[in-house]
Image: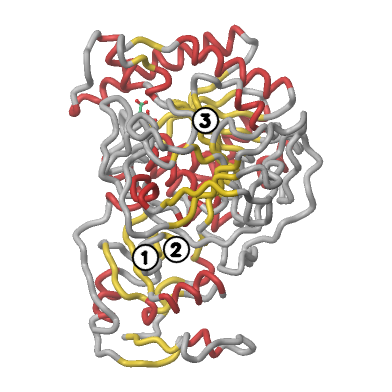
Amino acid sequence: MTIEACQVPVAEACIEASTARPRGYVKDVLGTDSSIFVIKVGTSSLVRPEHHTLNLSNLARLCEAVKELRAEGHHVIIVTSGAVGIGCQHLGLAAPERQKKRALAAIGQVQLIRYYENFLGALGLTCAQVLLTLDNLANRSQYLNARNTFTELLAYGVIPVVNENDTVAVQELRFGDNDTLSAQVAALVQADWLFLLTDVDCLYTANPKDDPTATPIYEVEDISHLHADTSTRGTQWGTGGMATKLTAGRIATAAGCTMVICNSNTPENIVRIARGEPRLGTKFFPLPHCLKGRKRWILSVPVRGKLWLSAAAVRAVRDRRRPLVASGVEQLEGDFHVQECVSLLDPSGCEFARGLASMAAPELGALLGGAPETHHHPEAHAAGSPHDPHEDCLPCASLEIVIQRGNLVPLAASEDGAASEEQPAAAPAESKMTAAPAPSVKASASDQDLVKAVAALKVSAAPHSGSSNGCRGGGCGGQGCCRVQSKSATHGSAYSSVSAKDAALHHLGNAVGGRMAASATA
Ligand SMILES: N[C@@H](CCC(=O)OP(=O)(O)O)C(=O)O
């Protein structure tokens, strides 16, 4: 893994290079090559913790930034938290009661949207309220309805203001955090940019409030190699943290979107970052492939289980885009049914793909518990597929297909960095301020959150010249680049004042039931 924290000079007044991607359904309907921005603002950025009052200046400057983007012809969707916090503020409560968050959200949402309406309205912009629950996007026809509605709103020049529909969402069908929701929305509309505004400047190697050696990370080419745990809880107001931001990053970058974490106190930086100015936040580059419609939708399906694969199976699935057969599964977790989404993890626990299961958990568990037997991965013998027979010789219980190729969605580039079969880069769009070009990176995936990510990092200041795996945004030209490399054994601390929550990856794992383990080699 290489994550760059580049000490690069500020880019000359440049508009970032246009992306070489198909513009997607929404832009096709809109008939535009302008960029689509999704901007997420968290509770900690909207509600002042000391007084529990609204942070009017942040909100006002956010709306001004939106105005600037609209003036340049770009489309903007805001994903906002704050309903619960503002509900408490409205009732004069010091803190939300856990059982009453739904009611508080109902009270606060009215106030929240009123503020947006006032601030955006004062700038001549119209906003629309969109409240979503997880099942709205998990259901394909509702997903397409939602996409059509967003498209129509953007065609009107309106600013959709999105929040989770906290009032009706039941626990199993919640996004649980707006970081994930914003990434889902970005994937839905095929946004070029997803900005997560929060109360820190960027991603750090450690919590800058606790650790004076904490170093900012400005560019992340391979989010999939970040390792983190979920041990730190979120605040009483919001539910997100850096952990959920990394989850969002995996979804957004897999969907071809550039994601940025930056400070909500300076929303005017959104425009500067999109123009290519470096070191104003952490930029996560999109994966080189571009998912087609149905596979893009699979990113919105709640994850109901996890499958740990053997190294050989990871290579077959990730690098050669083979279907997953039972022989490659070493362990499973969760009580998923047929056609439910499962997360695929490599032997180190990194999530590198998701897919819709062709068999239910009990059925797969029974197969994995079968007699050990050694035989070849069937895909290794596919006509014309070069393979190392040793690599493909898997101890397995079954060759039955667990996930069809068409139901597999990569969250990482293949080891050789090549774009997948999903959809190659197309002709560049001639647009201003479009997303950064897809990087050529090596990546696998992870389903971890931030604390382990920090633990997995080692910082070494070293001169470094820009390369395909090096600095982006102009390159450091050997002027000194703080390179962050993988380190597996040590432990670090959370690096965000927005604490990570233990239930950060709601849709990735929290809905998963009791652990069911079986070894193909046992
Ligand atoms: N939907 C909830 C916020 C959930 C949430 O993710 O909050 P945050 O961690 O502040 O982004 C609300 O409006 O209060």
Q: Where is residue 453 in the image (x, y as percent from the top left)?
A: 39, 49
Q: Which mark is nearer the camera, 2 or 1? A: 1
- Whichever of callouts 3 and 1 sits on the residue coming sooner in the sequence is 3
Whether residue 368 sits left or right of residue 457 in the image: it is left
Residue at image position (67%, 56%) is: 468
Q: Name the residue under label 3.
A: 262
The local secondary structure at tag 2 comes to strand
Q: Distance between the residues labelled 2 and 3?
A: 31 Å
Image side of residue 434 versus residue 337, left or right: right
Crowdedness of circle 1 by 10 Å Cα count: few (<14), some, many (20+)?
Answer: some
- Residue at image location 50% in from the left, 26% down from the top: 263
Residue type at mark 3?
A: Cys
Q: Which of 472 and 448 is in front in this view?
A: 472
Badge 3: residue crowd in 10 Å (few <14, some 14–19, many ≥20): many
Instruction: Tell me which label, 2 or 1, sits earlier in the chain.
Output: 1
Within 10 Å of disc 2 (Cα), the crowding (few <14, some 14-19, many 20+) is many
Question: Which residue type carries mark 1?
Answer: Ser
Secondary structure at badge 1 equals: loop
Circle 2 residue = 355
Tell me which image quadrant ligand 1 sits in: top left
State how far apart marks 2 and 1 are (Cα): 19 Å
- Residue at 56% across, 14% down: 61
Instruction: Give the residue number, with chain letter if any, for mark 1.
Output: 348
The image quadrant that residue 29 belongs to is top right
Q: In which quadrant of the rendered view does residue 403 lie?
A: bottom left
